[in-house]
């Protein structure tokens, strides 16, 4: 799809209650960590990235991954996957973006940041991984 048919917005993933000391990062392309950071005492981590939206809606950008013809998502890499060779964890969070409501996308296109908030810790105290639900989306 030509870029002329796409609108770029600012997007953000906020990880609330991440496991302290564990490195997290966005995934760039197919296999590179981007913007690694860690929470010192459980404070939230935020990852900003560009997101291009076309009618449909269809999603594009360096952090957008695809599965099948419709599913689009962003990966958060954790532990060794984020570049921390000493971590006991090698995980990824999959955050779906293809189900974001059109009204939120429209609001983000007129200004603001599309922000998704997730919980970063599983009940056993380890870092969250796999497909993350729920994701609370809003425009800030």
Image: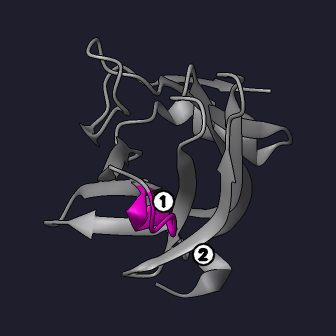
- Residue beneath disc 1: 55
Instruction: Using the rendered view, name the quadrant where residue 115 is placed.
Output: top right
Residue at x 67%, y 82% (from the top left corner): 4
**Regarding mark 2 in the picture, which secondary structure is present there?**
helix
Give the CA separation, mark 2 to mark 1.
Answer: 8 Å
Please say whether residue 69 is visible from this viewpoint: yes
* Identity of the residue furthest to the top in this view: 123
Task: Using the image, determine if residue 96 lies above or below residue 134.
Answer: below
Task: Bin the neighbour count of mark 2 within 10 Å (Cα to Cα): few under 14, some 14-19, many 20 and up.
Answer: few
- Determine whether, in the image, residue 120 is placed left or right of residue 61: left
Q: From which residue to which does the magenta span run?
A: 79-86
**Which part of the image, by quadrant, shows the C terminus?**
top right
Residue 16: x, y in percent? 59, 22
* Identity of the residue furthest to the front in this view: 86
- Determine whether, in the image, residue 140 is placed left or right of residue 27: right
Task: Using the image, determine if residue 12 lies above or below residue 32.
Answer: above
Residue 5: x, y in percent? 60, 75
Task: Using the image, determine if residue 34 lies above or below residue 15.
Answer: below
Q: Nearer the viewer, residue 95 or 19?
A: 19
Q: Residue 105, labelled with which disc?
A: none
Residue 63: x, y in percent? 51, 68
Residue 81 magenta-drawn?
yes
Task: Bin the neighbour count of mark 1 within 10 Å (Cα to Cα): few under 14, some 14-19, many 20 and up.
Answer: few
* Identity of the residue furthest to the right in this view: 111
- Determine whether, in the image, residue 132 is placed left or right of residue 106: left
Q: Nearer the viewer, residue 41 or 112?
A: 41
- Residue beneath disc 2: 5
Q: State which tag comes first along the sequence, 2 or 1.
A: 2
Q: Badges 2 and 1: C-beta atoms under 8 Å apart? A: yes
Residue at x 28%, y 11% (from the top left corner): 123
- Determine whether, in the image, residue 78 is placed left or right of residue 89: right
């Amino acid at each position: 799809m030509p870029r002329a048919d796409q609108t770029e917005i600012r997007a953000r993933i906020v990880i609330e209650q991440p496991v302290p000391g564990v490195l997290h990062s966005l995934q760039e392309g197919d296999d590179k960590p981007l913007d690694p950071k860690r929470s010192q005492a459980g404070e939230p981590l935020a990852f900003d990235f560009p997101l291009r939206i076309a009618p449909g809606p269809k999603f594009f950008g360096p952090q957008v991954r695809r599965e099948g013809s419709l599913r689009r998502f962003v990966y958060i890499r954790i532990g060794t996957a984020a570049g921390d060779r000493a971590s006991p964890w090698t995980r990824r969070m999959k955050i779906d973006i293809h189900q974001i409501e059109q009204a939120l996308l429209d609001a983000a296109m007129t200004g603001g940041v599309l922000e998704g908030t997730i919980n970063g810790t599983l009940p056993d105290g380890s870092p969250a991984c796999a497909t993350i639900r729920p994701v609370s989306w809003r425009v800030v």
